[in-house]
Each structure stands twice: as C-alpha cells, then as structure tokens.
C-alpha cells in the first residue's frame, strides 16, 4: 500500500508490514436529535419507547439492512399465514420467468378457486406482470394458480418448488400446501421466517415495484379492465411504508408483513394472528416506533481521536489518529468494531499528519464507513513506577 508523505512522494514508507486488525470500540460519544414522527413521514431520531404489548400472537421487527431482530414475540411459533403465502409464490415466479411481458393462458384449475379473484376465465390470455399485480395487490387466488401452472405445470408441482426454496433459505418453521394461502393442515410459517422471506423478497427491484402501489389497473384479453386495491391499510395510510403483503382468513385471523423506513432505519415488521385489521395497523406503527427508538446517530470516531498505536522498531510507539469525524446511525446495543489496515511497525517515526492506513467501522455486520489514519507523533513514555 502506498502512502503520501508531506513532500508528496508516494513511495512506500520503509519496512512496512501491512496487517488487518479488529478491535472493539467502547465509550463512543453519542448525540441524539429528537423530532416528532408524524403520519405523513418519518425522519430523524425518535425517543426511546417502552417495549410494546402488541395483540398479535407472534411478531418480529427486523432491521432490513442487517437482518438483526430488534423485537420478537413468539417469533418461532408456527401459525397459518393466509395470503402472506403469495410472497413466496411471487418470488419463485420472478426467479423462473424472466420475460414478464409473456402471455399465459388461464387454466381451468384457476377458475372457481376459493378466496379473492380477479374473475379470470379458462382460456383468457394475460401477461405475467398483470398476474403478479393481481396476486400481490388484489391477493387473487386465480392469479396464484395461473402463475403456478405456468411455472411448474400444476399447483402441486409448484408447491414442491415452494417448500424446496423454503428449505434452502433455512425457513425451518415454514411449510406450504398451496400457492395462495388457502387454509390447510400443513400450511404455516413463523413471524421470524416471514420476516426473513420478506427481507429477501424486498431486495428484488421487481418485487418492490409490485408491492409498493396500493392500487393497480389490470388489463387482459379479450378486453378485460379491472381496478384493484390493496388490503394493506398501513401502506395506504403512511408514505414511509412501501409494502409488503397482507393475509386474512378465519383460521389465520389477520396477518401482515410490512416494510418501511421509520426514523433513520429501514425495518421489516411481521405480525401473525391479529384480531382485527385496525389493531394490526396500530401494532405495526408501535413496532416501527419501537424499532427506530433503539438506534442513535452517533460519532463513531472523532477527527484527531487516537485509533491505535503501532510500535517503532527502535523502541516506543507511534500514535495513529483518525483524519476526519465519522458519524453513523447505530443500534444502541450493538458492538462497534474497527478493522485497521496499518503497518505492523515503523522503521522510523513517520511525519506527523502523513497518511499511514485506514480504519473501517462496522456494527451488526453493517459497514458504517471508513476514515484515513494519520501518524500523530510518538507516544509519550509512561511514567516510571514509584519505588
């Protein structure tokens, strides 16, 4: 690694032996800017809130970037998820069909299926994109069966793909019996698994584009036009919410996987077995507020602060300091770590202010940022012990 000396010479300093170091950073300075979050949007930091007592039988709040779960209530309890099933259905379709403008012929098996529909008839011609919009906005069972048949030949074969994918993703408490979420004995998930699946799905631009709108106009041959609206009340009420999927049945009650940016973080929130849609909306807002309250924008390292010390070959140590201040939003309970790329030792004292390496900071597996590391002079010798 080349470094810049004060005279501009970019030759390596003599006898540099570069190494990667990791250390735990403690005692970080923290600054908190408090603002009130309103229904129209959510920016800035929030007051720390108490752990909410939600009415859902099972719930999870997951940091969307890191995957860290910051709230859990019975996260691994197996419960029916109704139409939240369609998240996996859509994911497999997006994986298996690259041309979403392709027309598909509606099979007879899709007609008359229980649950919400868009009114497809056997022999209708409809694009994959329109079917996906009907699947995720209207939550249409006929769209689910049509897509499953297009991918795997029939719904039963498609379910094999669903369970295979769940196993591959490590969703140990998830099992599918159909592509739409119709109640069945071996059809269940957990709040943790649903959050994991939702996080994976939301990485896909195509999926995000499908679940963000709250309404869609569906057109298909021969001459059908239908306006559909999402059941996701949370998504309709708050502009900081951008999906994902609701579910509802007599057995499952109300289920919701939602995604949104609240405060200064993005979260996935999942609830299973809520008593009403209104309670579900209330609980999700509480859970977003709670999750955001666990994060603070803080000074990770200040300009001029000592980062580490490196030995001089002839004795003594060189103090290395941060070249600039790094601020980041960090979970309060997270351990912040630094990875240093600096020389193992110096043959001679480097010029004060010269760049000698970098320090990269991480928390919860997230890269917070990096700063250049400067030589800050020789460390003062420690005082001699008292006799």
Image: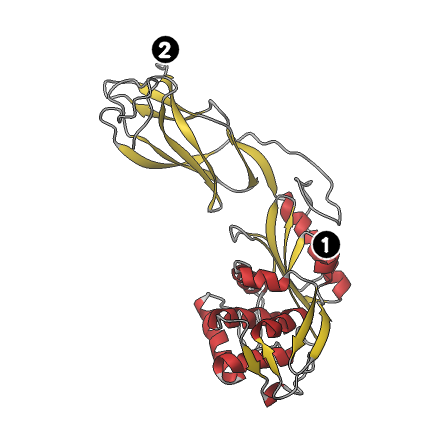
Of the pair 336 and 220, the residue shown nearer to us: 220
Of the pair 382 and 87, the residue shown nearer to us: 87
Q: Quadrant of the N terminus?
A: top left
Choose top left, top right, bottom left or bottom right for residue 226: bottom right
Residue at 52 percent of width and 53 percent of height: 67
Residue at 67 percent of width and 43 percent of height: 43
Q: CA gap, disc 2 to disc 1?
A: 66 Å
Task: Quickly name the residue at label 2.
Answer: 386
Mark before the other along the chain sequence, 2 or 1: 1
Residue at 72 percent of width and 67 percent of height: 231
Left-right relation of 229 to 184: right
**Seen from this angle, which residue lies furthest front?**
223
**How many residues crowd mark 1 within 10 Å: few (<14), some (14–19), many (20+)?**
some
Q: Quadrant of the C terminus?
A: top left
**How many residues crowd mark 2 within 10 Å: few (<14), some (14–19), many (20+)?**
few
Q: Secondary structure at mark 2?
A: loop
x then y, percent, for residue 364: 49, 46
Q: Secondary structure at mark 1?
A: loop
x then y, percent, for residue 362: 46, 41
Choose top left, top right, bottom left or bottom right for residue 227: bottom right
Please say if the residues under marks 2 and 1 sit with CB atoms less than 8 Å apart. Answer: no
In the depicted structure, whether residue 130 falls above or below residue 382: below
Left-right relation of 194 to 382: right
x then y, percent, for residue 151: 50, 79
Label 2 or label 1, whichever lies nearer to me, is: 1
Residue at 49 percent of width and 85 percent of height: 153
x then y, percent, for residue 290: 66, 48
In the depicted structure, whether residue 275 falls above or below residue 29: below
Q: Which mark is residue 224?
A: none
Task: Quickly name the residue at label 1.
Answer: 238
Choose top left, top right, bottom left or bottom right for residue 282: bottom right
Of the pair 122 and 375, the residue shown nearer to us: 122
């Amino acid at each position: 690694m080349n470094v810049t000396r004060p005279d501009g010479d970019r030759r390596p300093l003599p006898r540099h032996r570069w190494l990667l170091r990791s250390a735990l950073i403690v005692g970080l300075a923290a600054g908190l800017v408090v603002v009130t979050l309103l229904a129209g949007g959510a920016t800035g930091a929030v007051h720390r809130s108490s752990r909410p007592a939600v009415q859902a039988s099972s719930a999870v709040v997951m940091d969307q970037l890191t995957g860290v779960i910051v709230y859990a209530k019975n996260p691994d309890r197996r419960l029916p998820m109704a139409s939240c099933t369609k998240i996996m259905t859509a994911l497999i379709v997006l994986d298996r069909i690259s041309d979403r403008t392709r027309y598909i012929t509606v099979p007879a098996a899709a007609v008359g299926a229980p649950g919400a529909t868009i009114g497809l008839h056997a022999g209708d011609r409809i694009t994959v994109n329109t079917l996906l919009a009907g699947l995720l906005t209207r939550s249409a069972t006929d769209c689910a069966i049509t897509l499953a048949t297009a991918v795997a030949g029939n719904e039963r074969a498609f379910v094999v793909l669903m369970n295979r994918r769940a196993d591959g993703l490590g969703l140990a408490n998830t099992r599918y019996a159909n592509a739409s979420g119709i109640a069945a004995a071996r059809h269940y998930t957990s709040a943790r698994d649903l959050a994991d699946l939702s996080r994976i799905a939301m990485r896909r631009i195509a999926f995000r584009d499908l679940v963000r709108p709250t309404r869609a106009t569906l057109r298909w041959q021969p001459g059908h036009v239908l306006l559909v609206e999402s059941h996701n009340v949370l998504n309709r009420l708050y502009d900081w919410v951008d999906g994902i999927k609701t579910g509802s049945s007599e057995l499952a009650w109300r289920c919701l996987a939602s995604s949104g940016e609240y405060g200064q973080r993005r979260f996935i929130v999942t609830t299973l077995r809520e008593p009403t849609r209104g309670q579900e909306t209330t609980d999700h807002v509480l859970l977003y507020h709670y999750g955001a309250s666990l994060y603070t924008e803080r000074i990770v390292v200040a300009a001029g602060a000592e980062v580490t010390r490196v030995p001089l070959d002839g004795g003594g140590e060189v103090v290395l300091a941060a070249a600039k201040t790094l601020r980041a939003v960090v979970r309060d309970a997270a351990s912040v770590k630094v990875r240093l790329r600096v020389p193992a030792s110096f043959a001679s004292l480097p010029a004060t202010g010269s760049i000698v390496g970098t320090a990269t900071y991480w928390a919860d597996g997230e890269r917070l940022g990096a700063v250049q590391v400067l030589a800050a002079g020789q460390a003062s010798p420690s005082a001699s012990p008292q006799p």
